[in-house]
């Protein structure tokens, strides 16, 4: 079922659903500048529906970030290490490090 307008929640298995506003191609074309500004200001993608294909509008920065995340998670070992690191951070099992200069650092248990 194709969304008609309003909001659409794209599935994201790990953390949350990603909210996307939905507009038809005609609505987007009529308000193109406002659509770009909304996507840029809110960092929320816009799902644009049309008869031929649905497309997603997002900022270049958000796209690059998504591509980097997909690359980092593409290796099973790297993904496992990253998820373990997130779990350690969320449980408070981290060491706070302050860098005083290029060769010295102090560690403080958190």
Image: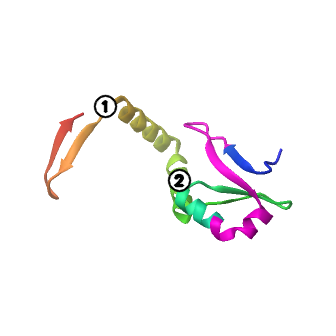
- Quarter of the picture containing the N terminus is top right
Q: Quadrant of residue 106?
A: top left
Instruction: Kindly state the secondary structure of the residue where label 1 is placed.
Output: loop
- Residue at the right extreme of this rendering: 51
Stretch of the chain drawn in magenta: 10-34
Q: CA distance from mark 2 to mark 1?
A: 26 Å
User: Which residue is the site of mark 2?
Assistant: 71
- For marks 2 and 1, give the one nearer the viewer: 1
User: Which residue is the site of mark 1?
Assistant: 93
Label 2 vs 1, first from the N-terminus: 2
Q: 43 left or right of 11? A: left
In the displayed structure, 89 sits above or below 78; it is above
| Rendered residue at 49%/50% (across/down) | 72
Q: Quadrant of residue 84?
A: top left
Instruction: Estimate the x, y position of residue 52 in percent, counting from the top left.
Output: 85, 62
| Rendered residue at 25%/37% (across/down) | 95
In the displayed structure, 47 sits above or below 84; it is below
Instruction: Estimate the x, y position of residue 11 in percent, counting from the top left.
Output: 66, 41
Badge 1 crowding class, 10 Å Cα cut-off, few under 14, some 14 to 19, many 20 or more, is few
């Amino acid at each position: 079922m194709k969304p008609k307008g309003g909001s659409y929640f794209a599935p994201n298995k790990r953390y949350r659903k990603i909210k996307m506003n939905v507009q038809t191609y005609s609505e987007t074309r009529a308000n193109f500048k406002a659509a770009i500004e909304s996507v840029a200001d809110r960092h929320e993608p816009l799902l644009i529906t049309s008869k031929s294909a649905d497309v997603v509008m997002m900022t270049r920065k958000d796209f690059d970030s998504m591509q980097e995340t997909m690359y980092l998670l593409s290796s099973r070992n790297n993904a496992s290490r990253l998820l373990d690191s997130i779990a350690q951070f969320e449980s408070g099992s981290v060491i706070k490090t302050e860098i005083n200069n290029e060769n010295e650092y102090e560690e403080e248990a958190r």
